[in-house]
Each structure stands twice: as C-alpha cells, then as structure tokens.
Image: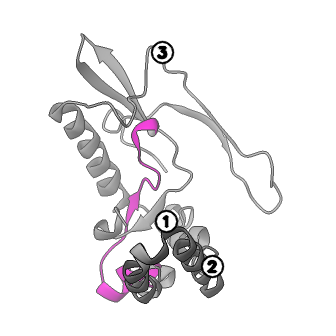
Amino acid sequence: MKLPQGKFPAPKIYCVRKFSESNLLKGYIIMEYLENVKTVHIYENITLEAMREVLHALAVMEAMSLSFDSEEKNEITNKLFSELYGQMFTDSSIASGMKMLRNFGGEELSEKIDKLENVLPEIGDVVWADNLADVLGMRRVICHGDLWSGNLLWRQNGSHDLKLVAMVDYQASLLLILSLRLY
C-alpha cells in the first residue's frame, strides 16, 4: 500500500514483516526515526488548527483507500469487530459482566443495568457491525483503528503551535464505512 508522498503524515517505512501462521512471534516494522517529536496527552488541549491537521490526515487516508486494488484490500481486515471483540461479546461474557455490575452497583443501578442488559445484545452485535457496509451498499474506507492522542506525533513550533508530523500504530486498521469509524 503506497501513501501519497507529502500528503499523509507518516514516517518512512523501510521494512515490514507481518505476523502470520508461520511467523507468530517476530512481526516488525522498521521505520524512519523522527527527531524532536512528542505526544500530546489526552488531558492536554490542542488548537483548532492542530485538530484540523488530524482530520485532514484522516480524510486523506480514507480517500486514498478508495483507490486500493483487491490485493491491498485483502491485506486489511473488514471483520475487525468479530476478530477483536467477538470473544468479549458472547452470551456468557455478557451475563458475567451484568452479574458483576449488579454486584457492584447494588439496588441504585438495578434499573439502569436492566436497560443495558436488554440493549447490549443489539449494540454488541459484532457481526452486524462488520457487515453494515454491505447491507447499506456503501464502499468501505480504511480506518486507523486505534486513533488516540498517543498515536499522534507532533513537533512543537513556538510555545503553543503544534505541527502534526505522523500518525502511527496501524495494527488495528480496518475497512469500514465512515459512519462506523467512531463505533
């Protein structure tokens, strides 16, 4: 998968070895070292302009994925919810979680826990989430999958001005429809 040069903030990738059935323990990415960068913690504020840089980078990433060929699309999962959360949303794990909430919350939260228990099978339907693009007839775009402040690398320009240098950590990248990006 090729990123448009200068359009998307990412370190240069020199070599990649994926985890696979025959390579269970030694996956790696060798990439460019970026000097004088920092992460901005989740409790720190950024300017509106800095947020625009993040949104622009996401838009570029999503737009470029529309031109992926089938081989590139096959490298990225479109069943992340089933693969990542499927074991967490089994009937037994949901029942166990509800029991734990009832023990923790007591009578005060009983009514709210009842409501949650009623809707959880629907909102935790990972197969539905994985297949929604097909049901709606929408094209999938690549989504970062783990976008949070720790995966954004910034360079300080002055006392408050930040410049987005790179988005990193794509191990959870997936093909989704835009509306599920924040699921």
Dot placed on the residue nearer the N-terminal end, 2 or 3 = 3
Q: Is residue 144 magenta?
A: yes
Q: Which badge, 1 or 3, comes first in the chain's sequence?
A: 3
- C-alpha distance separating marks 2 and 3: 47 Å
The residues tagged by marks 2 and 1 sit, at their Cα atoms, a distance apart of: 37 Å
Q: What's the colour scheme?
A: one colour
Please give the residue where the numbered disc 2 appears in the rendered image. 96
Look at the image and tell me whether residue 79 can be seen.
no
Instruction: Tell me the amino acid under the disc marked 1.
Output: Lys
**Residue 111 location in percent, x, y?**
37, 83
Q: Earlier in the sequence, mark 2 or mark 1?
A: 1
Residue span colored magenta: 128-150
Q: x, y (%) of residue 53?
A: 24, 36
Q: Which residue is mark 3?
A: 35
- Horizontal arrangement in the rendering, residue 127 relative to residue 164 (left or right): right
| Category of crowding for the residue at label 1, using alpha-carbon neighbours closer than 10 angstroms: few (below 14), some (14–19), many (at least 20) | some
